[in-house]
Image: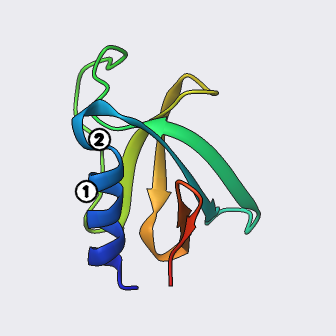
Amino acid sequence: MDNNAKFQAIMKAGDGGKFFSVRFIKRTTGEPRHMNCRLGVQKHLKGGDKPYDDREHRLVTVYDLQAKGYRSIPLENLFEINGTKLE
């Protein structure tokens, strides 16, 4: 599955502010990560813009429910959404 298809799958899973889970490999450490998250959360924004463009770096920014903060998911390392393996 290419990055565009993965992006569309995340958008569909999180449509309407629904909670969803993802599994991916972290870029920094190479370890697998499981995250329960949500798209579109704006309550905790501090203002200002990110110093990088998500699309350029093939990322999707979500709100991590356990960490209570924003996290970025690397599309190329994403391998599962809501228990469904991506191929």
Quarter holding residue 15:
top left
Q: Which residue lies under the disc numbered 1?
A: 53
Instruction: Identify residue type, mark 2.
Output: Lys
Q: Residue at x 40, y 41 (%)?
A: 62
User: Left or right: 11 with respect to 74?
Assistant: left
User: Left or right: 48 with respect to 36?
Assistant: left
User: Left or right: 16 with respect to 82?
Assistant: left
Element type at marker 1?
loop
Task: Answer above or below: position of 42 versus 32.
Answer: above
State how far apart marks 2 and 1 are (Cα): 7 Å
Q: How many marks?
A: 2
Task: Answer above or below: position of 63 versus 55.
Answer: above
Q: Which residue lies under the disc numbered 2?
A: 50
Task: Answer above or below: position of 67 versus 39.
Answer: above
Q: Residue at x 32, y 17 (%)?
A: 46
Tell me if label 2 and label 1 are in contact, CB under 8 Å: yes
Quarter holding residue 29:
bottom right
Image coords of residue 55 (percent x, y): 25, 64
Quarter holding residue 17:
top left
Within 10 Å of disc 2 (Cα), the crowding (few <14, some 14-19, many 20+) is: few
Instruction: Identify residue type, mark 1.
Output: Asp
